[in-house]
Amino acid sequence: MTNRYLINPGRRRALTVGGGLAALAGLPVVALADGVRQDPPAKAAGGGKALPDYAAWKDADAMIVHSANTIELRRDAFGNSTITPRERLYVRNNLTPPSADIVRDPDVWSLEVSGVAKPGNLTVAELKRLGLTAVTMVLQCSGNGRAWFPHKPSGTQWTVGAAGCVVFAGVPVKDVVKALGGVADGMKYMTSTGGEVLPEGLDPNTVKVERSVPLEAMEDAILAWELNGAALPLAHGGPLRMIIPGYMGVNHVKYIRHLAFTAGQSPAKIQQSSYRFYPVGEKGSDKYPSIWEMPVNSWITSPYQPGKSHPAGRVFLTGVALGGFHALKGVEVSIDGGQTWRAADWFGPDMGRYAWRNFALSVDLKPGKYMIATRATNDKGDTQPKERRENNRGYNNNSWLDHSVELEVV
């Protein structure tokens, strides 16, 4: 089945999603870490794809359900507000979510902390007494943009909708560490372990969600229990989630049960090989860079109506731009496929280094076909490249050519 929202007219390629579907109810399947498994499918009574029970509160008309664990926001549903509503935020789970029972009383959830002077366990209620902060940031799946890789890497064929800009609130990790006497000597990484139920009979390191990031990431990291002003829902890692602004989504470990400061990186497969930036045809290993910091990126969100034309005259081209790990500096728009560029204007609030910004460019268009591209630059000087950086798993695609759209004006 071809999905019109997976079409990049600029590349003249239609991408398909799905395959045989099976009912979600009663599935014994456990979705294993990215690159290891086939996500359990979702199915509605009428045969179409439906939101899974744990995300049934999502805006179904705005979402593309790839599977029970991968749900994407449609490109034409981003809107023009900086903050992505919770009901329109994408969903990506590396393992089947735990029971909804864990979010009924979030304050009793317990976190083990080790690799500090005074290791111990803290409930969410206790964490709430140690500190409080909030951060507006882009949350983005590492595979966002995977659909345009020509070698068709395994994994969900995301286009642009595995991203959102949201507000997380919780306690700064550095405040927790201070309360526990500081990081122990010799520790180089901050390692988070998820609280999903692991399938029996398998080596835990092959399936568990456990990610290590450089110790300096602790500076801005928070243990979050709130999303956009409400309790963190199960679909997004509630009751407690590790949040590391500027890092790709896999590092924001959901249902965090253990926070460890470690001398080395986690031995889990999801750390050692699955989320690595390695060449097409090779096997992932720790000799390749880990998927950590987010690259600069941008894309047009409106007008975007595949298969439909737009009336000639004044057109507002709008979209979102993110600086990645660094603050945004500017964004340019081209209506001729990158031959010429014009600076776009920001609109709406600047919500900080880690948030995206909305941009607009007013243009007068005569009848014809236009290739609309955007190109963002951050304050480090990084600019979106024309071509994607090829890699086996289809990670970190920030190619402006891939993200371009064709607009027919009549």
Image: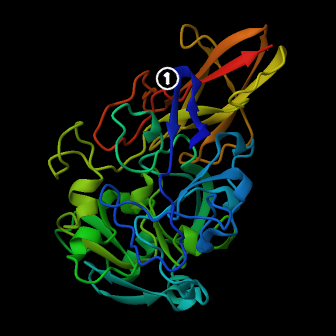
Give the residue displayed 46% in from the left and 27% down from the top.
Answer: 384
Q: Nearer the viewer, residue 278 or 218?
A: 278
Q: Is residue 229 left or right of residue 101?
A: right
Packing grade of label 1 (10 A; few <14, some 14-19, many >=20) is many
Give the residue displayed 39% in from the left and 73% down from the top.
Answer: 30
* 133 w.r.t. 156: above or below: below
The C terminus lies in quadrant: top right
| x and y percentages locating residue 88 in the rendered image | 67, 56
Q: Nearer the viewer, residue 335 or 369?
A: 369
* 295 w.r.t. 354: above or below: above
Give the residue displayed 25% in from the left and 78% down from the top.
Answer: 115
| x and y percentages locating residue 316 in the rendered image | 78, 24
Q: Nearer the viewer, residue 18 or 69?
A: 18
* 321 w.r.t. 231: above or below: above
Q: Is residue 176 left or right of residue 138?
A: left
Q: How is the image coloured?
A: rainbow
Q: Is residue 193 left or right of residue 229?
A: left
* 272 w.r.t. 103: above or below: above
Give the residue displayed 56% in from the left and 13% down from the top.
Answer: 337
Is there any visible trace of residue 49 in the rendered image?
A: yes
Q: Which residue is mark 1?
A: 401
| x and y percentages locating residue 173 in the rendered image | 43, 70
What is the quadrant of residue 42 in the picture? bottom right
Residue type at mark 1? Answer: Leu
The N terminus lies in quadrant: top right
Is there any visible trace of residue 334 in the rendered image?
A: no
Secondary structure under the numbered disc 1 in the rendered image: loop
| x and y percentages locating residue 212 in the rendered image | 29, 63
